[in-house]
Structures are given as C-alpha cells and as structure tokens.
Amino acid sequence: MSTGRLTLPHASHGGTPIGAVLADLLPAATASRARVRDAALVLGGAALTGIAAQIAVPVPGSPVPVTGQTFAALLVGASFGAGRGLLSLALYALAGIAGMPWFAAGASGAGGATFGYILGMLLAATVVGALARRGGDRGVLRTAGTMAAGTALIYAVGVPYLALSTGMSFGQAVAVGLVPFLIGDALKAALAMGALPTAWKLAGRRG
Ligand SMILES: O=C(O)CCCC[C@@H]1SC[C@@H]2NC(=O)N[C@@H]21
C-alpha cells in the first residue's frame, strides 16, 4: 500500500510517474493523512462495486445476471493498485457475506451460485492493480490487455464455482456463465480503456 508520498518517479510516461497508480496522485501530506485517504478509497471502492452490482439484468436461462460489477472491480483495482484494490473487494465480499445487500440485485451471503465471480473479482482487482502499477493502464492497448487479464480471472474462478455449486457440467457452466457475457464485458473493458488512459493524460497535463 502507498505511503502517500510520490517518491517513486524513476521514469515517466507523459509527465506522470511509472510505478504509480492513479490514486497515488491524490495528495496526502503526512503518513496519517495517507492512511485516512487509503481507508476512504477502500470504503469508496467497496461502495462503488456494491452500487454497480445493482445494475443487474437477468439473462434468460442463466442464474447469472449481467451486472456493472466487473467494470467497477477492474476500475478499482487499476486505479487504486493491488493493496487497496484487494482490501476494497475483500471488504465488499465480507460485508456481503455478513448480510449487506449489495451483491447483484440486492442479494447477500456466500451461498449463491454466483459467489465465485465475487471471489474472482477480488483476485482480478489485485492482479489488475499490480499490472497497473507496472504501466498496464497507460495507453489503450496496454489497458486492453490488463482488462482482458482481469476479466479472464473473474471467469477462471466464477465458472468452475458455478458448475460445482449447481451440479452443472463445466460445459454447461461455460454456456450459461461465460458466453452470454462476453460482449457486455468487452464493452465494459472498452469503457475502462477510454477512462484510464484519459485520466492519466489529464493528470499529466495538471502535473
Ligand atoms: O452475485 C453476484 O453479485 C455476482 C454476479 C456476477 C456476474 C458475473 S461477473 C462476470 C459476468 N459479467 C457480467 O456482467 N455478469 C457476470
């Protein structure tokens, strides 16, 4: 997790330091202010994911809805970095398990067939955050690769979990838990591909 001071710029990309994520650009003059900033980011990341989960559109024949969560989780990971991304999604998952109704369409608890996707989002936010810190959110092509890796991780956990928890075959789980979402997830990744490099460009102009 960041200490709050930008002491890292060994190299730069468009005037902004490689080795930083977007959230590092938020000023925090002291270590304790940096802790407050990071706590606010973690809470905000969990809340953003919970709000995005309420955009939930049922898919006929599938227990898995289209949701805004993947966009939120990947954006949180990329813009906060691995540590804060992991904590945001861990808070989201744990509060949801404890009864906070902010999983897809107001659900909660760990018993649902789609809980594996939430575990996948936790993993994806962490890995995407690590990639972003290595420059994986600078430029459209790099961001596309980072989002593709994060999305693949969500499915790598979510689809086998769906199969195990429902008794479906793996092929059926792919058919109802992956295939219907590919176009929507590509659109969400495209949104992130626009948003993250643009945010860095704006930060570079201000810096
Ligand atoms: O129950 C939950 O809160 C998790 C819902 C998971 C939805 C999955 S995530 C990957 C895929 N893309 C979507 O838009 N929906 C599914």
Image: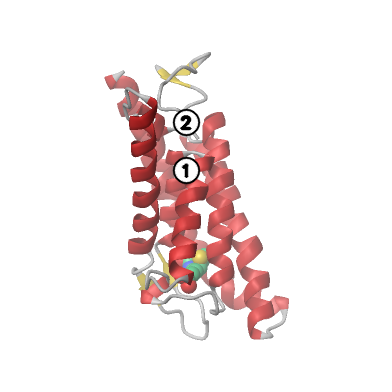
**In front here: 94 or 168?**
94
The amino acid pointed to by label 2 is: Ser
The image quarter containing residue 204 is: top left
Point 52% across, 25% down: residue: 19
> From the viewer's perspective, is 168 left or right of 23?
right
Local crowd at mark 2 within 10 Å, few (<14), some, or many (≥20)? some
Quick check: can you spot residue 184? no
Q: Is residue 192 above or below residue 23?
A: below
Residue at disc 1, secondary structure: helix
Image coords of residue 183 (percent x, y): 49, 62
Of all residues shown, which one is farthest toward the left?
206
In the rendered image, which residue does mark 1 sit on? 84
Point 33% across, 27% down: residue: 28
**In front here: 199 or 35?**
35
Residue 2: numbered disc: 2
Residue 19: numbered disc: none
Residue at disc 2, secondary structure: loop
Quarter holding the C terminus?
A: top left
The answer to whether marks 2 and 1 mark residues whose Cβ atoms lie closer than 8 Å is yes
Q: Is residue 137 above or below residue 124?
A: above
Point 48% across, 76% down: residue: 109
